[in-house]
Amino acid sequence: MDSIYAPWRIEWVERETDPIDGCPFCVLPERADARDARIVARSDHNYVVLNNAPYNPGHAMVIPDAHVDDWTALGDAAMLDHGRLKAATLAAARRGIEPTGFNTGLNLGGAAAGGSIDHLHTHVVPRWQGDTNFMPVVGDTAVIVEAVDRTYGHLHEAFAADDAVVDAGDADAGDAVRLSFDAGDD
Ligand SMILES: [Zn+2]
């Protein structure tokens, strides 16, 4: 039987060696080193972080800077920016890691929906023909950390090729790629 399930159920983003006090999606963007925080791109109102416990390589989340738990709480500018950054994330993944397809989704309403963090976030999970859950298949933390770091490099480079880039940044220096969707089209 083919199993099509909700890969975005996997919410965990913390590393055991690096505990976070408070909301991780508020804390991570404040860190000086974007690579260490796994933040690969930032726009005017949102950012993209790679999941520390990826369902698949390239498993990313698009997250508003503001701590809100529902779309209705997000202003129009941030909502448009969220959609544009999600589109840029899909495009960067296509360029950088060439998946066959994607699942994208939201967990709203906490545990009932498989979510554990009440800060709005959209999962973007690349899929390949015949893939299976990367975590149980690999099952080795060191391998996963190394894989996430390698994927970070590929996606950073791919985001840097986006038309909306205002600062490509240096991944090794701890800079996320800066994008802005405000310029030129409205
Ligand atoms: Zn938060």
Image (spheres, helix red, strand yellow):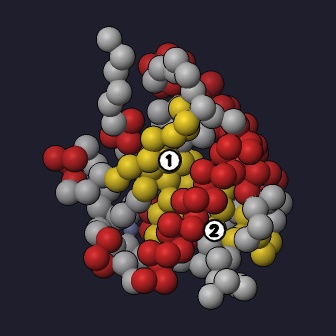
Give the quadrant of the C terminus. Answer: bottom right
Q: Residue furthest front?
A: 185
- Residue 140 visible in the snapshot: no
Q: Residue 104 has which mark?
A: none
Query: Which quarter holds ligand 1?
Result: bottom left
Which residue has dot 1 on it? 124
Please name the residue shown 20% across and 57% down the image. 109
Give the quadrant of the N terminus. Answer: top left
Q: Nearer the viewer, residue 44 or 182?
A: 182
Q: Residues within 10 Å of mark 2 (few under 14, many from 20)?
A: many
2 displayed left or right of 44 = left
Q: On screen, 65 above or below 6?
A: below
Which residue has dot 2 on it? 42
Q: Quadrant of residue 39?
A: bottom right
Element class at badge 2: strand
Q: Residue furthest top?
A: 1
Q: Nearer the viewer, residue 156 or 90?
A: 90
- The amino acid on which the numbered mark 2 sits, given as a three-letter code, is Arg
Residue 110: percent from left, percent from top: 22, 54
Residue 174: percent from left, percent from top: 75, 60
